Image: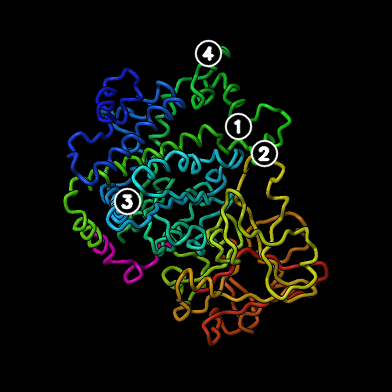
Amino acid sequence: TYLIKTMFHRFSLNLCWFIPFAVGAKEDLSLTSPITLEILKFQKSKDHYYETQLSELYGGECASFFRPRINGTRTPVGRQIMMGETSSISHDWDYLKRKIMKKILRYKLKGQQEKFVWATGGHSIAAGHGNLFKESYTMVLIKYVKPLFESIGLQFEGRPFAMGGTNCAFEVSGCVKEVFGTDVDFLYWDYSLIVGQCLACVEHWFQRASLIPARPAFGIDGRSKYSPITEETRKRGYAVFHFDKRVRSALEKSLPLSSNKTLDDLNQMPPNVRGYQCAQSDKQICKDRKWSTYLDPKEPCNKRSHQQSWHPGWQWHALQGHLLTQFLIEVLDDALSAIGAYASDPETLLETLRRQEQQFFSNFFPKNYSTKWPFPMLPTGESIDAIYKRPNYCSIARLPAQIRYAGILTGYSGNYIDSSYDRGTNQTDQSVFSAHEEVQLMWTESNYQTHCKKDLLEIDHTDWFLGATKNSSPKMILPTDSEIAAYGNHVESLVGYIFICRAPGPDLDKKHQLGIEGEGDSLENGDYNITVNKKLVTGYTYIFGCALLKHQGGYIFPKRENGRFEFKFFTDRQDSYVRFTSVMVW
């Protein structure tokens, strides 16, 4: 019945119906093929996305809008949007396609549950600031692509783990596996607004992310200035897709204008088009519709922080999410097609894919890659290659981070949607400041926008660790048993380089906070002290919000007999406390 329906609707006058069949309907598959059912399920799910969901949101414009004419030929936007400035798109595409093929085959042959993990890292735009959290582009992607993966038996897990006002280095790059997880398949980089010209930041992030065990494919929302780094990442066997903003810009310009229309005419426009594009002479209509609002003007969720001019509204995020959805649709389509061609011998195909992957990583970079854009502030005479190439451990309090949600940090797991994870101690609980033997995980309620009860507004928070107070000198061990279990036992390879980071945080009691600050820091002024395995920290080198600690004998701290590091924090300042957001050891 579905095949008959498919053939009939190929000639439907509804233009949005035409997209799936032009994009890649499989009409030559044998009905005896073991993969045929999965292909038909996927095709049906894809048809529903284009026919029903996308058509309702973008109307009849979707046929030409999502299949723009390039050099006289209409091409699905999913095959254009992630090509960008690269000559290696075939390698990138095959890399990601192979990842998905292996998951499908393992599920079909072995019956084991497989999931595809997408993670987004970035600044406030990627985090969706100013909007409802569910309107951020990664959440849009999750909503629409998840049923497509489920149609072929795969789970889809999205991690929208951007952090407002955050560079990709040094804290995030040093804690990249702790933030995004060790099982991520696609890692999307969206930090360009904060990173600017810091090639050293980008290189460190990509080198550390390349060490994630799942060997993710990468996407980058950035300009050509980062291409030298992404090309080096490709040379090590990885895939790096460039999001092509030129394609997006051309799509936006093709949308109908909302200016100079009556209210009735506006209401006839599809919701994702209405108020998106306006003429320069009449932009008020678009400004009035930039942020979604509840009908009740007294609804607290209508009052949201971060609604600045540089933060895009919900329609921008919706389009971004749909463009990334269509990118994954095309890769899924190709993966299924490739499996279908070898449907008679799936076991051999799976083994071939495994061998191909091993070949791609035969020149894995820790063996033969040297840093080309090192941080200029790194001390000379040190074996700094360790912070690029060696395994490390990081305890990070900031959210969002997989180390928090998976329960690795505190032992209590949860998720970001219902806030079921272990939050730690509210800063308003003054009892924790009086005496504590262990470093405490803290959060500041005023930063959570808790006035909105109907929806999440954001999940990125600068939660922090409470170190010393006047009445307590707490300790912290790194790595912990749970961190070794989650990230592997690498204590023997640790050199002894220590970083402590202090991201900008809550203004509450800011005058009483002590911690790493760069110039004129209170550590060097003697306001507080740190010991690492009983060696007194005497200074540090400041690198993008983090401090490479040193003692009287240099930068390398000796390990304990069990290969671990014990930190202790001290202060004699009355009514003051030590605040930091992460600790790393290499």
User: Compared to 297, does 512 lie above or below?
Assistant: below
Q: Residue furthest front?
A: 1
Q: Position of residue 241 (x, y in %)?
A: 36, 48
Q: Residue furthest bottom?
A: 561
Identify the magenta region: 356-373
Task: Look at the numbered discs 2 and 1 and tell me whether their residues touch, using CB distance below 8 Å.
Answer: yes
Q: Residues within 10 Å of mark 1 (few under 14, many from 20)?
A: some
Mark toward the start of the polypeptide (3 vs 4): 3
From the image, tell me which residue sits under label 3: 100
Identify the residue position indicated by label 1 in the image. Answer: 291
Q: Residues within 10 Å of mark 3 (few under 14, many from 20)?
A: many
Please state which amino acid type lies under the numbered disc 3.
Answer: Ile
Instruction: Give, as a three-letter code, the residue at label 2.
Output: Arg
Q: Which mark is residue 265?
A: 4
The residue pinned by badge 2 equals 304
Residue 261 versus residue 144: which sits nearer the camera? Answer: 144
Q: CA distance from mark 1 to mark 4?
A: 20 Å
Along the line of sight, which residue is nearer the eye, 357 or 48?
A: 48
Q: Does the magenta segment cover residue 254?
A: no
Q: Quadrant of residue 151?
A: top left
In percent of the image, x 66 and y 62: which residue is there?
A: 464
